[in-house]
Amino acid sequence: RFSISPEQDSVIIVSSGDNYKQVLPPDLWKVDEEGPTAFTGEQAFTSAILDVTDQNTKTIYFLKGHGEMQPDDVDPLRGLSQASYFLRQRNFEQGMLDLTTVPKVPDDAGLVIVAGPQTELLPPEQEKLRRYLSDQNGRMLVLLDPARSHGMDDLFYDWGVLASDMLVIEASNDFIASEGDSLIGNFEEHPLTDILRKNQLKVLVGLSRPIRFDEGSPIDASLTVTELMLSSPQSWAETDYKQETIRFDKDYDIAGPVPIAVVSERSAGDRFGLNIPGGKLLVIGNTNLFSNNRFSTAANELLFHNIIHWILDQESLVNIQPRKLENYQITLSRRDLIDTGLRLLILPAGVAGLGIIISL
Protein backbone atom coordinates (compact mmCIF):
# COMPACT_ATOMS: atom_id res chain seq x y z
CA ARG A 1 0.00 0.00 0.00
CA PHE A 2 2.76 2.47 0.87
CA SER A 3 5.29 1.38 -1.84
CA ILE A 4 7.95 0.42 0.70
CA SER A 5 10.72 -1.57 -0.97
CA PRO A 6 12.53 -4.43 0.83
CA GLU A 7 15.80 -2.45 0.60
CA GLN A 8 14.49 0.36 2.81
CA ASP A 9 15.76 0.01 6.38
CA SER A 10 13.97 2.98 7.92
CA VAL A 11 10.90 4.83 6.71
CA ILE A 12 8.14 6.86 8.38
CA ILE A 13 4.73 6.98 6.70
CA VAL A 14 2.41 9.98 7.03
CA SER A 15 -1.02 8.97 5.76
CA SER A 16 -4.42 10.64 5.35
CA GLY A 17 -7.14 8.85 3.42
CA ASP A 18 -5.69 7.57 0.17
CA ASN A 19 -2.77 10.03 0.31
CA TYR A 20 0.53 9.14 1.90
CA LYS A 21 4.09 10.35 1.94
CA GLN A 22 7.33 8.73 3.00
CA VAL A 23 9.69 10.57 5.32
CA LEU A 24 13.18 9.13 5.01
CA PRO A 25 16.24 9.52 7.28
CA PRO A 26 17.96 12.11 4.99
CA ASP A 27 14.89 14.33 5.42
CA LEU A 28 15.44 14.54 9.19
CA TRP A 29 18.95 15.93 9.42
CA LYS A 30 21.00 18.79 8.11
CA VAL A 31 24.59 17.64 7.69
CA ASP A 32 27.98 19.09 6.88
CA GLU A 33 31.48 17.64 6.62
CA GLU A 34 31.51 16.72 10.33
CA GLY A 35 28.11 15.01 10.40
CA PRO A 36 24.60 16.03 11.53
CA THR A 37 24.34 19.65 12.66
CA ALA A 38 20.59 20.20 12.97
CA PHE A 39 17.33 18.29 13.31
CA THR A 40 14.92 19.11 10.45
CA GLY A 41 12.27 16.57 11.40
CA GLU A 42 9.71 19.20 12.46
CA GLN A 43 9.79 20.74 8.99
CA ALA A 44 9.74 17.33 7.29
CA PHE A 45 6.78 16.05 9.34
CA THR A 46 4.78 19.28 9.06
CA SER A 47 5.36 19.42 5.30
CA ALA A 48 4.31 15.78 4.98
CA ILE A 49 1.11 16.41 6.95
CA LEU A 50 0.25 19.40 4.77
CA ASP A 51 1.05 17.40 1.63
CA VAL A 52 -1.24 14.46 2.41
CA THR A 53 -4.11 16.69 3.58
CA ASP A 54 -3.89 19.06 0.58
CA GLN A 55 -6.82 18.44 -1.73
CA ASN A 56 -5.23 20.43 -4.60
CA THR A 57 -2.61 17.85 -5.53
CA LYS A 58 -0.32 18.88 -8.38
CA THR A 59 0.73 16.42 -11.08
CA ILE A 60 4.22 15.90 -12.52
CA TYR A 61 3.83 15.57 -16.29
CA PHE A 62 6.37 13.91 -18.59
CA LEU A 63 6.35 15.34 -22.10
CA LYS A 64 5.98 12.82 -24.94
CA GLY A 65 5.85 12.86 -28.72
CA HIS A 66 9.51 13.63 -29.48
CA GLY A 67 11.27 10.42 -28.42
CA GLU A 68 11.65 11.52 -24.79
CA MET A 69 12.67 9.19 -21.98
CA GLN A 70 9.57 7.76 -20.31
CA PRO A 71 8.73 7.00 -16.65
CA ASP A 72 7.49 3.46 -17.38
CA ASP A 73 10.56 2.47 -19.41
CA VAL A 74 12.89 -0.02 -17.63
CA ASP A 75 15.67 0.33 -20.22
CA PRO A 76 18.98 0.95 -18.38
CA LEU A 77 20.12 3.75 -20.69
CA ARG A 78 16.91 5.54 -21.69
CA GLY A 79 14.42 4.50 -19.02
CA LEU A 80 13.19 6.58 -16.07
CA SER A 81 11.38 3.85 -14.13
CA GLN A 82 13.62 4.29 -11.06
CA ALA A 83 13.01 8.05 -11.01
CA SER A 84 9.27 7.37 -11.41
CA TYR A 85 9.36 4.91 -8.50
CA PHE A 86 11.14 7.55 -6.42
CA LEU A 87 8.26 9.96 -7.12
CA ARG A 88 5.61 7.32 -6.35
CA GLN A 89 7.23 6.65 -2.98
CA ARG A 90 6.69 10.30 -2.14
CA ASN A 91 3.05 10.36 -3.25
CA PHE A 92 3.57 12.48 -6.37
CA GLU A 93 0.94 12.10 -9.07
CA GLN A 94 2.43 11.46 -12.53
CA GLY A 95 1.01 11.79 -16.00
CA MET A 96 1.93 11.99 -19.68
CA LEU A 97 1.58 15.18 -21.70
CA ASP A 98 1.22 15.46 -25.48
CA LEU A 99 1.10 19.16 -26.32
CA THR A 100 -0.30 18.48 -29.80
CA THR A 101 -3.57 17.21 -28.32
CA VAL A 102 -4.30 19.87 -25.66
CA PRO A 103 -4.86 23.64 -25.95
CA LYS A 104 -2.47 24.37 -23.07
CA VAL A 105 -0.54 22.77 -20.25
CA PRO A 106 -3.13 21.45 -17.73
CA ASP A 107 -3.90 23.65 -14.73
CA ASP A 108 -2.99 20.84 -12.32
CA ALA A 109 0.59 20.66 -13.66
CA GLY A 110 3.00 21.23 -10.81
CA LEU A 111 6.00 20.35 -12.98
CA VAL A 112 6.64 19.48 -16.63
CA ILE A 113 9.66 17.25 -17.31
CA VAL A 114 11.13 17.25 -20.82
CA ALA A 115 13.60 14.35 -20.71
CA GLY A 116 15.87 14.06 -23.73
CA PRO A 117 13.76 14.98 -26.78
CA GLN A 118 15.19 13.41 -29.93
CA THR A 119 13.33 15.72 -32.33
CA GLU A 120 12.41 19.40 -32.17
CA LEU A 121 9.28 20.62 -30.47
CA LEU A 122 6.90 22.33 -32.88
CA PRO A 123 6.49 26.14 -32.52
CA PRO A 124 2.94 25.81 -31.08
CA GLU A 125 4.25 23.35 -28.47
CA GLN A 126 7.04 25.72 -27.47
CA GLU A 127 4.53 28.55 -27.18
CA LYS A 128 2.32 26.50 -24.84
CA LEU A 129 5.32 25.86 -22.58
CA ARG A 130 6.25 29.57 -22.65
CA ARG A 131 2.73 30.49 -21.54
CA TYR A 132 2.80 27.81 -18.87
CA LEU A 133 5.99 29.27 -17.37
CA SER A 134 4.94 32.91 -17.65
CA ASP A 135 1.16 32.96 -17.24
CA GLN A 136 0.74 29.99 -14.89
CA ASN A 137 4.02 30.46 -12.96
CA GLY A 138 4.86 26.94 -14.10
CA ARG A 139 7.88 24.76 -13.37
CA MET A 140 9.98 22.90 -15.95
CA LEU A 141 12.88 20.46 -15.77
CA VAL A 142 14.57 20.01 -19.15
CA LEU A 143 17.22 17.35 -19.83
CA LEU A 144 19.04 17.70 -23.15
CA ASP A 145 21.30 15.34 -25.12
CA PRO A 146 24.33 16.60 -27.03
CA ALA A 147 23.97 16.86 -30.82
CA ARG A 148 20.17 16.94 -30.67
CA SER A 149 18.01 19.88 -31.78
CA HIS A 150 15.29 20.59 -29.22
CA GLY A 151 13.26 23.47 -30.67
CA MET A 152 13.12 25.49 -27.43
CA ASP A 153 15.65 28.22 -28.22
CA ASP A 154 13.10 31.05 -28.04
CA LEU A 155 11.81 29.82 -24.69
CA PHE A 156 15.35 29.55 -23.33
CA TYR A 157 16.16 33.05 -24.62
CA ASP A 158 13.27 34.53 -22.64
CA TRP A 159 14.63 32.89 -19.50
CA GLY A 160 18.31 33.74 -19.96
CA VAL A 161 19.47 30.23 -20.88
CA LEU A 162 21.79 29.27 -23.74
CA ALA A 163 22.02 25.60 -24.79
CA SER A 164 24.89 25.50 -27.28
CA ASP A 165 25.39 22.67 -29.75
CA MET A 166 28.77 21.67 -28.33
CA LEU A 167 30.24 18.72 -26.45
CA VAL A 168 31.94 18.95 -23.04
CA ILE A 169 35.30 17.16 -23.04
CA GLU A 170 36.71 16.16 -19.65
CA ALA A 171 40.52 15.98 -19.49
CA SER A 172 41.15 15.58 -15.74
CA ASN A 173 41.56 12.03 -14.42
CA ASP A 174 40.21 13.23 -11.09
CA PHE A 175 36.81 13.73 -12.73
CA ILE A 176 36.70 10.66 -14.96
CA ALA A 177 35.16 7.49 -13.49
CA SER A 178 36.71 4.07 -14.05
CA GLU A 179 34.16 3.21 -16.77
CA GLY A 180 34.88 6.45 -18.64
CA ASP A 181 31.93 8.54 -17.46
CA SER A 182 32.46 12.07 -16.18
CA LEU A 183 32.11 13.14 -12.56
CA ILE A 184 30.72 16.57 -11.75
CA GLY A 185 31.83 17.92 -8.39
CA ASN A 186 31.89 21.65 -9.06
CA PHE A 187 28.67 23.25 -7.78
CA GLU A 188 27.69 26.87 -7.37
CA GLU A 189 25.96 28.10 -4.22
CA HIS A 190 22.22 27.43 -4.41
CA PRO A 191 19.61 25.59 -2.28
CA LEU A 192 19.68 22.79 -4.88
CA THR A 193 23.38 22.13 -4.45
CA ASP A 194 24.25 23.22 -0.89
CA ILE A 195 24.42 19.70 0.55
CA LEU A 196 26.52 18.48 -2.39
CA ARG A 197 28.95 21.39 -2.04
CA LYS A 198 29.32 21.07 1.73
CA ASN A 199 29.94 17.33 1.59
CA GLN A 200 32.08 17.44 -1.57
CA LEU A 201 29.81 14.96 -3.35
CA LYS A 202 29.85 14.20 -7.08
CA VAL A 203 27.26 13.18 -9.65
CA LEU A 204 27.97 10.71 -12.45
CA VAL A 205 27.12 11.81 -15.99
CA GLY A 206 27.77 10.69 -19.55
CA LEU A 207 28.23 12.94 -22.57
CA SER A 208 27.06 16.49 -21.84
CA ARG A 209 26.46 19.74 -23.67
CA PRO A 210 27.14 23.18 -22.16
CA ILE A 211 24.20 25.05 -20.67
CA ARG A 212 25.10 28.66 -19.91
CA PHE A 213 23.68 32.00 -18.87
CA ASP A 214 22.74 33.85 -22.05
CA GLU A 215 24.34 37.28 -21.66
CA GLY A 216 22.44 38.57 -24.71
CA SER A 217 18.98 37.71 -23.39
CA PRO A 218 16.55 40.39 -22.12
CA ILE A 219 17.16 40.01 -18.40
CA ASP A 220 15.07 42.12 -16.02
CA ALA A 221 14.98 42.56 -12.26
CA SER A 222 12.39 39.80 -11.83
CA LEU A 223 14.68 37.08 -13.27
CA THR A 224 17.56 35.34 -11.49
CA VAL A 225 19.81 33.00 -13.50
CA THR A 226 22.34 30.71 -11.79
CA GLU A 227 24.85 28.35 -13.39
CA LEU A 228 24.59 25.33 -11.06
CA MET A 229 26.96 22.56 -12.16
CA LEU A 230 30.33 22.93 -13.88
CA SER A 231 32.97 20.60 -15.28
CA SER A 232 36.59 20.69 -14.09
CA PRO A 233 39.03 23.52 -14.95
CA GLN A 234 40.89 21.10 -17.24
CA SER A 235 37.82 20.48 -19.41
CA TRP A 236 36.49 22.41 -22.38
CA ALA A 237 33.42 22.62 -24.63
CA GLU A 238 34.26 21.41 -28.14
CA THR A 239 32.59 23.12 -31.10
CA ASP A 240 33.71 20.75 -33.86
CA TYR A 241 33.02 17.57 -31.89
CA LYS A 242 32.33 15.45 -34.98
CA GLN A 243 35.91 15.60 -36.23
CA GLU A 244 38.16 12.59 -35.84
CA THR A 245 40.79 14.33 -33.71
CA ILE A 246 39.47 16.50 -30.89
CA ARG A 247 41.67 19.16 -29.32
CA PHE A 248 41.08 22.50 -27.67
CA ASP A 249 40.95 25.54 -29.95
CA LYS A 250 40.88 28.80 -28.01
CA ASP A 251 39.32 30.66 -30.95
CA TYR A 252 36.22 28.47 -31.16
CA ASP A 253 35.95 26.35 -28.01
CA ILE A 254 35.01 27.27 -24.42
CA ALA A 255 37.66 26.77 -21.75
CA GLY A 256 36.66 25.04 -18.53
CA PRO A 257 35.07 25.03 -16.08
CA VAL A 258 32.07 24.63 -18.40
CA PRO A 259 28.54 24.98 -16.93
CA ILE A 260 26.22 22.10 -17.81
CA ALA A 261 23.16 23.16 -15.76
CA VAL A 262 21.36 26.47 -15.34
CA VAL A 263 18.39 27.36 -13.16
CA SER A 264 16.29 30.41 -13.99
CA GLU A 265 13.81 31.76 -11.45
CA ARG A 266 11.30 34.56 -11.93
CA SER A 267 9.62 36.55 -9.18
CA ALA A 268 5.95 37.33 -9.77
CA GLY A 269 6.16 40.47 -7.63
CA ASP A 270 6.11 41.75 -4.06
CA ARG A 271 3.02 42.25 -1.95
CA PHE A 272 2.81 43.26 1.70
CA GLY A 273 6.56 42.74 2.00
CA LEU A 274 6.36 39.13 0.75
CA ASN A 275 8.13 37.90 -2.36
CA ILE A 276 5.74 35.97 -4.63
CA PRO A 277 7.53 33.17 -6.51
CA GLY A 278 6.98 32.91 -10.25
CA GLY A 279 8.04 30.31 -12.78
CA LYS A 280 11.14 28.14 -12.51
CA LEU A 281 13.14 26.62 -15.34
CA LEU A 282 15.99 24.16 -14.79
CA VAL A 283 17.94 23.01 -17.85
CA ILE A 284 20.62 20.29 -17.63
CA GLY A 285 22.82 19.42 -20.60
CA ASN A 286 22.73 15.72 -19.82
CA THR A 287 19.94 13.14 -19.87
CA ASN A 288 21.49 9.98 -18.47
CA LEU A 289 22.32 11.24 -14.98
CA PHE A 290 18.76 10.24 -13.99
CA SER A 291 18.45 7.17 -16.23
CA ASN A 292 17.98 3.76 -14.60
CA ASN A 293 21.64 2.74 -14.76
CA ARG A 294 22.89 5.95 -13.08
CA PHE A 295 20.01 7.04 -10.84
CA SER A 296 21.32 5.27 -7.71
CA THR A 297 25.02 5.97 -8.35
CA ALA A 298 27.14 8.68 -6.73
CA ALA A 299 24.94 11.61 -5.58
CA ASN A 300 22.55 11.45 -8.56
CA GLU A 301 19.51 10.41 -6.53
CA LEU A 302 20.22 13.09 -3.93
CA LEU A 303 20.38 15.72 -6.67
CA PHE A 304 17.06 14.52 -8.11
CA HIS A 305 15.55 14.65 -4.62
CA ASN A 306 16.71 18.24 -4.19
CA ILE A 307 15.46 19.28 -7.63
CA ILE A 308 11.94 17.90 -7.14
CA HIS A 309 11.42 19.34 -3.67
CA TRP A 310 12.95 22.71 -4.46
CA ILE A 311 11.21 23.25 -7.79
CA LEU A 312 7.83 22.42 -6.21
CA ASP A 313 8.48 24.84 -3.32
CA GLN A 314 8.30 22.07 -0.75
CA GLU A 315 11.30 23.39 1.14
CA SER A 316 9.53 26.69 1.65
CA LEU A 317 6.14 25.13 2.35
CA VAL A 318 6.62 25.75 6.05
CA ASN A 319 9.13 28.03 7.70
CA ILE A 320 10.33 25.92 10.60
CA GLN A 321 13.93 26.54 11.49
CA PRO A 322 16.12 23.45 12.03
CA ARG A 323 16.99 22.80 15.66
CA LYS A 324 20.73 22.97 16.10
CA LEU A 325 22.44 20.04 17.79
CA GLU A 326 24.50 21.35 20.66
CA ASN A 327 27.04 19.52 22.81
CA TYR A 328 26.99 20.51 26.47
CA GLN A 329 29.81 19.71 28.88
CA ILE A 330 29.49 20.05 32.65
CA THR A 331 32.73 20.56 34.56
CA LEU A 332 32.61 19.38 38.19
CA SER A 333 35.20 19.43 40.94
CA ARG A 334 35.83 16.25 42.89
CA ARG A 335 33.79 17.61 45.82
CA ASP A 336 30.91 18.57 43.47
CA LEU A 337 31.07 15.12 41.92
CA ILE A 338 30.86 13.41 45.35
CA ASP A 339 27.99 15.67 46.47
CA THR A 340 26.08 15.06 43.23
CA GLY A 341 26.61 11.30 43.50
CA LEU A 342 25.36 11.24 47.09
CA ARG A 343 22.24 13.25 46.20
CA LEU A 344 21.48 10.92 43.29
CA LEU A 345 21.85 7.90 45.57
CA ILE A 346 19.49 9.15 48.31
CA LEU A 347 16.23 8.28 46.54
CA PRO A 348 17.15 4.78 45.29
CA ALA A 349 18.78 4.01 48.67
CA GLY A 350 15.63 5.10 50.50
CA VAL A 351 13.46 2.93 48.23
CA ALA A 352 15.77 -0.05 48.78
CA GLY A 353 15.73 0.45 52.54
CA LEU A 354 11.95 0.70 52.58
CA GLY A 355 11.74 -2.51 50.56
CA ILE A 356 13.98 -4.32 53.05
CA ILE A 357 11.88 -3.14 56.02
CA ILE A 358 8.63 -4.26 54.39
CA SER A 359 10.10 -7.67 53.50
CA LEU A 360 11.07 -8.19 57.15
Image (cartoon, helix red, strand yellow):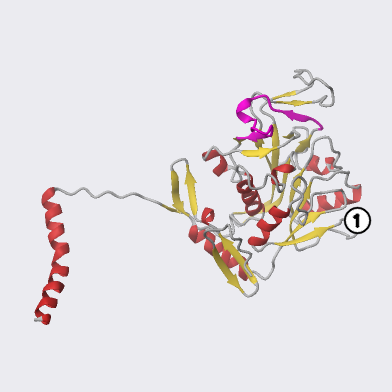
Residue position for label 1:
100
Q: Does the magenta stretch include residue 251?
A: no
**Callout 1: few (<14), some (14-19), or many (20+) C-alpha neighbours within 10 Å?**
some
Compared with 16, 277 (above or below) is: above
Q: Given the image, on which type of amino acid does mark 1 rest?
A: Thr
Residue at image position (58%, 57%) is 7
* SS at circle 1: loop
Compared with 235, 335 (above or below) is: below
The residue segment tinted magenta is 165-185
* Residue 133 seen in this snapshot: yes
The answer to which of 19 and 265 lies nearer the viewer is 19
Quadrant that contains the C terminus: bottom left
- Give the percent coordinates (x, y) of residue 89: 64, 61
Q: Does the magenta stretch include residue 183?
A: yes
* Residue 223 seen in this snapshot: no
Count the marks: 1
Residue at image position (61%, 61%) is 5
- Give the percent coordinates (x, y) of residue 341: 15, 58
